[in-house]
Image (cartoon, helix red, strand yellow):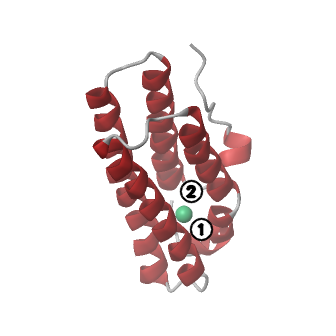
Amino acid sequence: MAALIQWDNAKYSVKINSIDEQHKKLVALINQLFEAMSKGEAHEQLSAIIQELIKYTETHFGTEEAYFKKFGYDNSAEHENEHKKFVEQIKKFQSDFEVGSVTLSKDIIFFLKDWLINHICGTDQHYTDFLLSKGVK
Ligand SMILES: [Fe+2]
């Protein structure tokens, strides 16, 4: 089965290796979730992937935000707000999924995919020069 998202370095790289690696892991988790859904895996399996995705998303946002704070990045408030809103959205989905009021659908997975790709290709690109100038690799 073809992966939902194929990592495209020319488009997705923020030119900071440590952050690219984290973005690749998020891509892998969304792919994993899509594959599990497509195979009709049980609620419990999907649940575990959703939990892992939320956990890793928070870890990753934490990494970026720690850099913003450490180096005094000017656009951090707006950027952090995007992170916060996204985490709220996926946690809301998670709780609805856990009580059974929604099922995991293609729409949800496409929302995750589009959000991540738009964020990586848009907002995240804005910190590249700044973080590179601070020696972040
Ligand atoms: Fe970000």
Residue 12 vertical placement versus 67 (above, below): above
Q: Is residue 22 left or right of residue 7?
A: left
* Three-letter code for the amino acid on which mark 2 is drawn: Ile
Q: Residue at x 37, y 49 (%)?
A: 96
User: How far from the left and from the top, in percent, is residue 95?
Assistant: 33, 51
User: How far from the left and from the top, in percent, is residue 116?
Assistant: 58, 51
Where ligand 1 lies, by quadrant?
bottom right
Residue 113 vertical placement versus 33 (above, below): below
Where is mark 1, residue-wise? 132
User: How far from the left and from the top, in percent, is residue 81?
Assistant: 52, 75
Which of 89 and 6 lies nearest the eye of the viewer?
A: 89
Label 2 secondary element: loop
Instruction: Categorize mark 2 by other alpha carbons within 10 Å: few (<14), some (14-19), many (20+).
Output: some
Label 1 secondary element: helix
Question: Cβ(mark 2) to ligand 1 < 8 Å?
Answer: no
Q: Residue furthest front?
A: 101
Where is mark 2, residue-wise? 16
Q: Residue at x 65, y 47 (%)?
A: 114
* Three-letter code for the amino acid on which mark 1 is drawn: Leu
Residue 2 — which label?
none
Residue 115 vertical placement versus 98 (above, below): below
Instruction: Categorize mark 1 by other alpha carbons within 10 Å: few (<14), some (14-19), many (20+).
Output: few
Give the mark nearer the N terminus: 1 vs 2. Answer: 2
Q: Residue at x 48, y 34 (%)?
A: 28
User: Quarter holding the N terminus?
Assistant: top right
Pointers 1 and 2 in contact (C-beta within 8 Å): yes
Which of 136 and 23 lies nearest the eye of the viewer?
A: 23
Q: Quadrant of residue 43?
A: top left
User: How far from the left and from the top, in percent, is residue 58?
Assistant: 37, 59
Distance CA(mark 1)–CA(mark 2): 7 Å
Tell me, yes or no, if residue 128 can be seen here: yes
Residue 44 vertical placement versus 18 (above, below): above
